[in-house]
Amino acid sequence: MAKKLRVGILFGGRSGEHEVSLLSAASVLKAIDRKKFDVVPIGITKQGHWLAPGDAHSLLAGDTSAVARRLRAGDPEATPGAKLLHEGIPTLMVPEPANGESAAKAALSPASPAMLDVVFPVLHGTFGEDGTIQGLFELAGIPYVGSGVLGSSAGMDKDVMKRLFAQAGLPIVKHVTILRSEWEKSPKKAIAQIEKVLKYPVFVKPANLGSSVGISKAHDRKTLGPALDEAAKYDRKLVIEQGVGGELRKGKLGPKARELEVAVLGNDDPKASVVGEIIPGKEFYDYEAKYLSEGSVPIIPAKLTRAESKQIREMAVAAFRACDLAGLARVDFLMEPSGKRRIYINEVNTLPGFTQISMYPKLWEATGVPYTELITRLIEFALERDCEKKRNSYSRDDK
């Protein structure tokens, strides 16, 4: 009988998407094929404390009904026992082991008797999908699911991402990038720079963040300033994008852009899922619409012509390659609500939400890849990528 691979499921983290990560991890731990894999849960608190496997289990244990604020993504049937941390207060912290090694080093070190064969990071947002944790895996020499350091950081930075899309000839909306220091030093100059290039409405975003945290829609100069202040709380770079649809006319909002999503899977030969659509319950698909409030409706597959669907799937694969991604990504698009129905690529998400009711797994399920099989494929792609990497020589003396 073949030896089972030892898979570390890494979750939690210091980002604003900590709670979403717990839900994703609970789903993965429930669905992963235990006949093929031995599973080691590794948790990280919001304060950055690494939890050894036993304590990581405790982080996910408990009754979700006791949590005062529950994320709508936490489907109790899909993620039983997923315990959220209320207001960011950790339920436990692990003391340093007696030998002085940190829990992180003990869990990840190749010299450890409990060596991991591969890590599945279910970490969303800052310090999880921005290349930082991927750098740790690279230094430790451990295969891991998802994109490498470059792809992860490029996929997190909306300014750099757009530059790569443009270089690849992919259609993007008009945008302006300014620094927080520029906005704080000369607000009038920054607003003039934005208004010279863009027309209202505009979306204001922190360049490096996920789950639509810190994003605002500004319909005029009066609302632009507060939107820039909000985004500046989260990053030193601010990206301001031309809105697609949703113009304010005579006090009424016009038709909104259609928000389309595609899941991509693979390494050097990536494949695209069917196209899905999100109809937000609010004016746009922000954090609250995604996770807290009711009303947002996913439509899989999206109602598109065959030509539109083909175009979007091809663009998704091209975006995946433009950012040098690997393993998985969700690629998001905007479509004009009327007229020429032009399609723009919005962004890539290199570690998207991964509960059973998240869009990435649902898109692959609709394409014919069930959730448990999807987890297995991602682990296999991680090992494939590691084998490819081992072909590299790092000095002239390597044989």
Image (tube, rainbow, N blue to C red):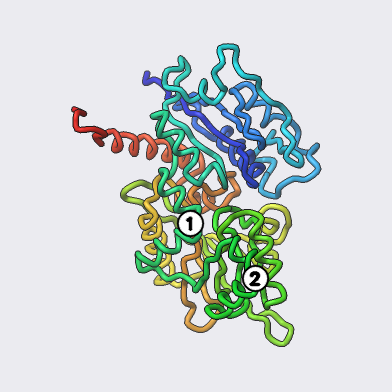
Please, what secondary structure does the residue beneath circle 2 have?
Answer: helix
In the rendered image, the vertical position of residue 126 relative to residue 278, given as above or below: above
Whether residue 390 is situated above or below residue 6 in the rendered picture: below
From the viewer's perspective, is 396 left or right of 193? left
**Which of disc 2 and disc 1 is earlier in sequence?**
2
Circle on res. 348:
1
Separation of residues labelled 1 and 2 (CA atoms): 30 Å
User: Looking at the image, can residue 244 be seen?
Assistant: no
The front one of 258 and 45 is: 45
Mark nearer the viewer, 1 or 2:
2
Residue 31 picture quarter: top right
Q: Amino acid at mark 2?
A: Pro
Q: Residue at x 58, y 53 (%)?
A: 210
Task: Give the crowd class for mark 1: few <14, some 14-19, many >=20 residues within 10 Å.
Answer: many
- The answer to whether 289 is drawn above or below residue 48 in the figure is below
Q: Nearer the viewer, residue 193 or 103?
A: 193
> Residue 333: image x %, image y %?
50, 65
Q: Position of residue 136 (x, y in %)?
A: 46, 34
Q: Is residue 40 left or right of residue 94?
A: left
Residue drawn at point x = 60 percent, y = 61 percent: 180
Q: Is residue 155 above or below residue 39?
A: below
Give me the residue at 69% from left, 33% from top. 81
Identify the amino acid type marked 1.
Answer: Val
Extreme-top residue of the structure: 98
Q: Which residue is mark 2?
A: 187
In the image, 352 versus 65, the foreground residue is: 352
Left or right: residue 161 compared with residue 293? left
* Residue 209: image location, x then y, percent: 58, 53
